[in-house]
Amino acid sequence: MSDLTRRLPWLTGVAVGLAFLTICFSIGLQKGGNLINIAEQAALTMAYPVQKGIDLAFTTCGEVFDRYINLIGTRDKNLRLEKEVAELNHRLAQLEETRLENQRLHKLLNFREQYDVLARGIAAHVIGRQTESLSRILIVDCGHTRGIRVNSPVFTPGGVIGRVVACGPQSAKVLLLTDRNSACDVIVQRNRARGILQGTGDRVCRLAYLRRTTKIRPGDQLITSGLDGIFPKGITVGSIIAVNHQANDLSQDIIVKPEFSADTIEEVYILPSSPTL
């Protein structure tokens, strides 16, 4: 590229500028203006596009910067609001959990007031569950430092749920009525027939050792007999949901639904030791 080609844009600009100035001077002189005013007006006219462009650039940059700052501020504000909402939701969840716990404990207290023999019992929280194979066991947060002993009976507002089978200083293991190793001496409330409630390892129990001639029907309520030396007499245990007669008509397969659900128990009521029956 020759020097002339490289200088052509610059020369063109100078030529255009000179031509513009010449026109301005000519027009100004024709209108009777003096040379200084004409030169000043020409300079202002030529500088206007540059100044306007610089001003527009600064204005645009300022607006962009302001918007950027506003966006950052809005984002930070949104983050703070989201954090506050999360904290409030957490507090609401805690308050609701406290309300529900108080409601359950109130039911336990009402249950205790229904039976004089339970007046010296204590409330405990479930802190663990063991449901391997056919086992149905709860772990609670009180032990022999609070008077709990092996065979201490355990209740919920629905009635009997089981008994303590192992005890440490601060915790105890509760064998539920549904455990296959569990047994409880019971009475059919309607006709006073006596039998043994046995766990199946599932969610139900079976009523065994009834006389063959005993009339049992679904809906019959079972209560503790007090004859096993563990559970006080007259506490609700469960209800009969099915009676299946064997083919030889010598026995009955009686299915009992306990008054609790092992998966939802969170608090229990324990007698520190077996009462005198």
Image (spheres, rainbow, N blue to C red):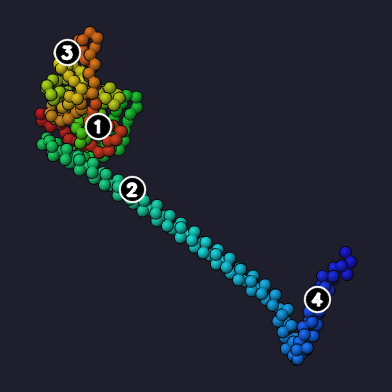
Q: Position of residue 189 (x, y in %)?
A: 13, 25
Residue for point 12% across, 21% down: 191
Give the Cα separation between the discs numbered 3 and 2: 54 Å
Q: Earlier in the sequence, mark 1 or mark 2?
A: 2
Location of residue 126 with respect to 214 vertically, above or below: below
Q: Earlier in the sequence, mark 4 or mark 3?
A: 4
Specify the label residue 212 is tagged with.
Answer: 3
- Indicate the quadrant where residue 187 lies: top left
Residue for point 21% across, 35% down: 156
Amino acid at the residue labelled 2: Ala
Amino acid at the residue labelled 1: Phe
Residue 120 visible in the picture: no
Instruction: Compare residues 262 and 53 and report the one nearer the observer.
Output: 53
Residue for point 51% across, 64% down: 70
- Is disc 4 in contact with disc 3, using a CB cutoff of under 8 Å? no
Give the Cα separation between the discs numbered 1 and 4: 100 Å
Q: Position of residue 95 (x, y in %)?
A: 30, 49
Specify the label residue 151 is tagged with.
Answer: none
Q: Which residue is mark 1?
A: 260
Position of the C terminus, as image quadrant, is top left
Residue 20 visible in the picture: yes
Q: Earlier in the sequence, mark 4 or mark 2?
A: 4
Judge the density around disc 1: few (<14), some (14-19), many (≥20) Cα neighbours within 10 Å: many
Q: Which residue is mark 2?
A: 93
Give the Cα separation between the discs numbered 1 and 3: 28 Å
Amino acid at the residue labelled 3: Arg
Q: Nearer the viewer, mark 4 or mark 2?
A: 4
